[in-house]
Amino acid sequence: MIQKITYNTEFYRDLFEYYREPYNNYDSFVEKYKQFFNNDIKQLQQFMDLRANILCAVADLGLNLYGLNFDKLSPELFILKAAFHKEPKYTLKHNQDIYNSSRINLSISHVQCKGYGFPWRIYDIMASGGLLISSYSKLLAEKTSGIVEIPMFKSPNDVHELCKYALENPSYCEDIIAKSNAFIEKYGRWKSNLETIENNTKIKLINNDNQESKLIILESQPPEQRHIINRKTIKRVKTFIYSISMALLQMPVLYSLFKNKKKLRSKIQRYWD
């Protein structure tokens, strides 16, 4: 596989044509070169994936990385390892704090987006106080057309220039952030989602007459609380059963009835430990 693409100037040229226009050239590039990779599209996509290159391109501008496995990157990407914060970030508040405290929030799409789709985090970032700079997405450009022009990049050089300009021009960032927030308020909240469902299903979901609701909302315990209760119940039952068993083992007559005494004693001992 490597031999087929090494010193292959045509592959090299076509790959950079894909980088320049991912939406227009993804399908033709994959179709042309998939046989080089024995039709293993995932291996081909590894050559098309610029995510690490993009991060390296902005490392000198104050990059901070969160998540998993950045510390397991190859030694050649040591600059990304140095920018990695190991503290786990996984909750809604974690994401909100990062997005709102960052001047720029990068969103780098996977190759499988084909220059068209975009990840869910895009809307989260657009609702925050940080500027979104995204890899090119035709769908995102279409959805935000006429409301906000999201800065998008297609190459590592593009992303460096965009980020540098944004850092040097706060008013530019503030304008896009304000328009992004407005877009989310209009099209990214659950009310707009419900309206879309209403239009497609012809089922009324939103009550606009401000009348008092006749629905009764019953408070229920969250799943984690139910699990705690279940575990406590199981522990009580086990404690009762093992306590009885321990007591019976002390009685010579009943002790002789247990066929596997060592196993029972071992099980009880492990439980109490």
Image (cartoon, rainbow, N blue to C red):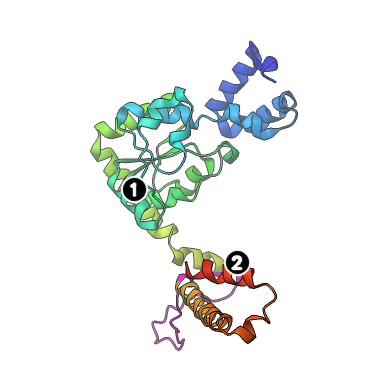
Q: Amino acid at mark 2?
A: Asn
For marks 1 and 2, the one nearer the N-term is: 1
Please name the residue that numbered disc 2 is placed on: 200
The quarter holding residue 45 reads top right
Direction from residue 173 to residue 190 in the image, left or right: right
Q: Amino acid at mark 1?
A: Tyr
- Whether residue 159 appears in this view of the structure is no
Against 195, residue 30 (above or below) is above
Does residue 202 show up magenta in the picture? yes
Q: Residue at position x 49%, y 27% from top?
A: 74
Residue nearest the observer in this picture, 223 or 23: 223
The quarter holding residue 86 reads top left
Against 238, residue 49 (above or below) is above
Q: Which residues are magenta?
A: 198-224
Residue 138: percent from the left, percent from the top? 53, 40
Residue 149: percent from the left, percent from the top? 40, 41
Does residue 219 show up magenta in the picture? yes
Of labels 1 and 2, the one closer to you:
1
Please name the residue that numbered disc 1 is placed on: 99
Residue nearest the observer in this picture, 9 or 273: 273
Q: Residue at position x 53%, y 83% from top?
A: 247
Label 2 environment density (alpha carbons within 10 Å; few <14, some 14–19, many ≥20): few
Direction from residue 267 to residue 127 in the image, left or right: left
